Structure formats: structure tokens, C-alpha cells
């Protein structure tokens, strides 16, 4: 049974009514299921038990300390893209020796922090970054472990904003330049070549892009071996999608076994960087209907009905940014006549919507659950329109825990100062 299910006419997270959550913590708020998070990690890991592997959760998908701590206790490593994410991982009890540092713009300070922490590997994304890291490590008397993030120019067949493996994307080292850059890295005194990294995008629902990219990477690994550059790990990135509406991504076991079959006979450790796949369907956002604004039936065009809710694009950016779909359901569905609504927020932007053309029976004050909100929901939230960010709650069986307090308005300008 799903961790989010209806019981006695009310949507529940595990054994807790979402109505109870909303009454205690108010809305909007994010609610996560500990069981769903745990099950997703264990299902991903199940096909890897006989392989030398490390699952590095992509922190950008959801950086909640409670979620990071849960994954750390399950044995996860972490994929980070900033010094702030490194600090979060360490605060959550993550093992720095299981951290890989991706991202195209690592600063001197971030490199120093990661070297001092003793992370597993830097995923290098440009020649300039490689030279900077060599210099920083030299100043500190350290040797930096690196992989090059190789851009295989493979189409991930996903939204262009989350496609990262094409030659015109900002990410990674051009495939044609990789050999020469590996040779430079191998000759640097404060760099140790450990691996090769490849991440082609996010919300990918087919196996073929992953396997096409891995074929190119393995050809590169063989070429490097012929030049005396030994690769000890292959980081295949993340990107496997989830079901938001009718998508049918491959099962974790199908995905991991396809990767391992490609790696058969090779003495390498394989790293995975799942993010959305582990957390996306483990969370919902709760929001309350503030107003119903009905369209004029005399309009020549189809009238628009609006359900104005207390959550907005600052709380969940994905619909406005990507035109992304999230299923939206009533926590206590009503019988009777339904209408088609635009589910919109109070932010002063026409792009402030959570869902278009949703068929529901609604009254003002009703509670809605925006599903599949565990990834890139709270992590992308902002304070636009001076709106405090939402509370976060973790449900564990019949218990619920506040894992992030709702911000207060005064906190939003507490660091600001008036000029004399």
C-alpha cells in the first residue's frame, strides 16, 4: 500500500490524517513519509547487493537535515553542488568520505572546505576548475581526488532545463577534450585521478539514454587505460524519473541491472546519484482553498474558474518554472458536482499556478494535497512577495515530527539595515 492513502474518506500519510497535520502545523506545509523514503532507498539498493557500489543522494533534490540523516543511517553517500550542501551533509551526520562534489562553479573557499572535510571525490567540470583545484590543494599540502564529468552529447529526452548531457549544455567536459584533460590531471602534483563521471539530465523515463552515455564513457575508460591512466570508479550520475501523472520510468532493478551488465568484468566501483527518484513521491504539499472565483457563464470563451489557495509559486516552483504537472487531490473529497479549476496562489504573477484544468468539487476552506512534491519543492522555495517558507513535517507510522519550523515574517528582513 502507498504511504499516502485514503482511510475513512481522508487522505493519510502512513497512519496520520493529513487533516490532523494541517490543523496542527497550518498550511502551506510539506509532509514526508519516512517509510516511503526508506523503501525507495532500499529498493534502489536491492539490485546492487553483489556489486561494489555507492548510492550518493543528490542533496539538491531535498536538503532537509532529517532526510539527509535518514539516508546517512541507511548507508548513503551524497552528491553535493555547493559548500552549503556540504555543511548540511556534515550537520546531518553524513560521512564526508562518501561525498562527491559536482557543480560548474566551485569557489576557492568551497574547495578548501571539501579538502579539509576529506571528501571522496571532486567531479571536475572544466579545465580551469582543474587548475584551480590543483593550486588550492597545493597551498594546503593536500592531494585532491578527482573525476572528470564527461559530457557525452547524449539526448536525455527530458525538459531542456534539466537536460545536462548535450554539447551545448554548461555542464561537464566535452567528450572530445577529455583524454587531453585527463593527461593533464595525471601529471599534476596535487591531483589524483580516481574516476570518470557522467550525468546527462533529470526525470529521464527511458533506459536508452543512460546506456548510450555509458557506452561512450566505457570507451573513454578503455582509452585511458591504454595510456596508463587507471580508473577506479565510474559515476553514472542520476536522473531516473518518477511518475507524476502517466510516466512509466523503468523500475530501479531494471535500471541498476542494465548498468551492471554494461560494467560486467570490470574491476571498478560504480557510483549512482539518485535524487528525485528517492524523494519525489515520498512527499506532498498541503494547501488550503482561500477563495473560489467563478468565471462568467455569459463569456463567449470557456469561463475560467479559479481556486485560490494559500500556497504559491514561491512554495512550489516547478509548475511555473517547467510547466510541470503535479496531481492535486482533495484531502477529504466531496460527493456531488465537480467543476474545472485553475489552482492558483496569491503571488502577484500570472505564472503563479500549481495546476491547470483540475476537475474537483471544492468549497472555500477545503484542504488540498499537491502530490509528488518531495523533490525540488522545498529545496527551490523562495521568499518572493515576502512570504515565509513553509513548515516541514515527517510522518513515522502513527507519529509526526516537525523537522523545519515555518519561517516568521520578521526573520525575512532581520539581516537588512536602513541607511543613516
Image (cartoon, helix red, strand yellow):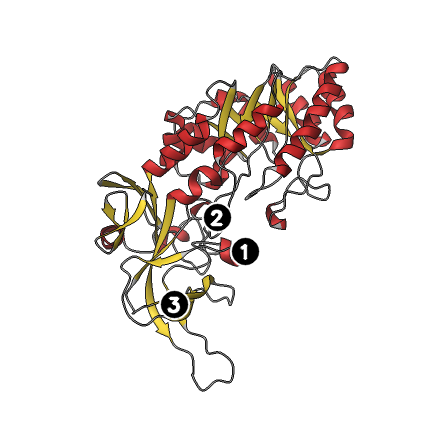
Across and down, in percent, residue 116 comes to: 52, 21
Circle 3: is it few (<14), some (14-19), or many (20+) Cα within 10 Å? many
Q: Nearer the viewer, residue 254 or 362?
A: 254
Residue at (32, 36) in percent of width and height:
35
Residue position for label 2: 380
Question: Which numbered disc covers residue 63?
Answer: none
Q: How far apart are marks 3 and 2 (CA)?
A: 21 Å
Q: Which of 81 and 412 is in front in this view?
A: 81
Work out whether 61 lies above or below 196: below
Residue at (54, 55) in percent of width and height:
321
**Is residue 313 in view?**
yes
Circle 2: is it few (<14), some (14-19), or many (20+) Cα within 10 Å? some
Q: What element carries label 2?
A: helix
Across and down, in percent, residue 294 comes to: 39, 77
Residue at (56, 42) in percent of width and height:
202
Q: Distance between the residues labelled 1 and 3?
A: 19 Å
Across and down, in percent, residue 227 comes to: 77, 15
Question: Which numbered disc covers residue 308?
Answer: 3
Tags 1 and 2 touching, CB below 8 Å: yes
**Reading the chain from its start, which is encountered first: label 1 or label 3?**
3
**Reading the chain from its start, which is encountered first: label 1 or label 2?**
1
Q: Which of 54 and 310 is in front in this view?
A: 54
Question: Which numbered disc covers residue 321?
Answer: 1
Q: How far apart are marks 1 and 2 (CA)?
A: 10 Å
Tags 1 and 3 touching, CB below 8 Å: no
Side of 7 relative to 381 (left or right):
left
Amino acid at each position: 500500500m502507498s504511504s499516502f492513502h485514503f482511510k475513512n474518506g481522508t487522505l493519510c500519510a502512513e497512519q496520520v490524517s493529513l487533516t490532523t497535520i494541517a490543523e496542527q502545523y497550518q498550511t502551506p506545509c510539506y509532509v514526508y513519509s519516512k517509510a516511503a523514503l526508506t523503501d525507495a532507498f532500499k529498493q534502489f539498493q536491492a539490485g546492487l547487493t553483489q556489486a561494489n557500489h555507492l548510492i550518493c543522494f543528490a542533496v539538491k533534490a531535498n536538503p532537509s537535515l532529517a532526510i539527509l540523516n535518514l539516508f546517512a543511517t541507511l548507508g548513503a553517500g551524497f552528491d553535493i553542488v555547493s559548500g552549503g550542501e556540504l555543511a548540511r551533509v556534515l550537520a546531518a551526520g553524513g560521512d564526508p568520505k562518501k561525498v562527491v562534489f559536482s557543480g560548474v562553479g566551485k569557489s576557492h573557499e568551497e574547495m578548501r572546505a571539501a579538502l579539509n572535510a576529506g571528501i571522496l571525490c571532486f567531479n571536475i567540470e572544466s579545465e580551469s576548475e582543474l587548475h584551480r583545484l590543483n593550486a588550492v590543494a597545493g597551498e594546503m599540502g593536500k592531494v585532491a581526488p578527482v573525476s572528470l564529468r564527461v559530457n557525452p552529447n547524449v539526448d536525455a529526452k527530458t525538459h531542456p532545463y534539466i537536460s545536462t548531457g548535450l554539447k551545448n549544455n554548461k555542464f561537464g567536459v566535452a567528450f572530445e577534450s577529455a583524454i587531453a584533460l585527463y593527461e593533464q590531471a595525471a601529471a599534476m602534483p596535487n591531483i589524483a585521478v580516481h574516476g570518470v563521471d557522467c550525468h546527462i539530465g533529470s526525470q529521464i523515463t527511458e533506459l536508452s539514454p543512460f546506456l548510450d552515455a555509458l557506452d561512450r564513457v566505457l570507451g573513454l575508460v578503455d582509452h585511458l587505460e591504454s595510456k596508463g591512466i587507471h580508473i577506479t570508479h565510474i559515476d553514472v550520475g542520476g536522473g531516473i524519473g518518477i511518475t507524476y501523472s502517466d510516466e512509466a520510468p523503468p523500475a530501479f532493478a531494471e535500471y541498476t541491472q542494465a548498468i551492471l551488465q554494461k560494467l560486467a568484468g570490470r574491476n571498478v566501483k560504480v557510483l549512482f546519484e539518485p535524487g528525485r527518484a528517492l524523494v519525489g513521491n515520498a512527499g506532498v504539499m498541503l494547501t488550503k482553498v482561500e477563495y473560489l472565483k467563478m468565471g462568467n457563464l455569459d463569456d463567449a470563451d470557456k469561463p475560467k474558474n479559479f481556486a485560490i489557495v494559500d500556497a504559491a509559486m514561491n512554495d512550489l516552483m516547478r509548475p511555473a518554472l517547467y510547466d510541470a504537472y503535479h496531481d492535486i487531490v482533495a484531502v477529504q473529497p466531496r460527493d456531488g458536482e465537480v467543476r474545472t479549476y485553475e489552482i492558483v496562489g496569491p503571488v502577484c504573477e500570472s505564472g503563479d499556478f500549481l495546476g491547470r484544468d483540475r476537475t474537483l468539487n471544492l468549497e472555500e476552506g477545503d484542504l488540498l494535497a499537491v502530490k509528488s512534491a518531495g523533490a525540488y519543492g522545498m529545496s527551490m522555495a523562495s521568499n518572493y512577495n515576502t512570504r515565509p517558507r513553509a513548515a516541514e513535517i515527517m510522518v513515522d507510522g502513527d507519529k509526526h515530527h516537525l523537522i523545519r519550523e515555518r519561517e516568521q515574517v520578521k526573520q525575512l528582513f532581520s539581516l537588512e539595515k536602513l541607511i543613516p
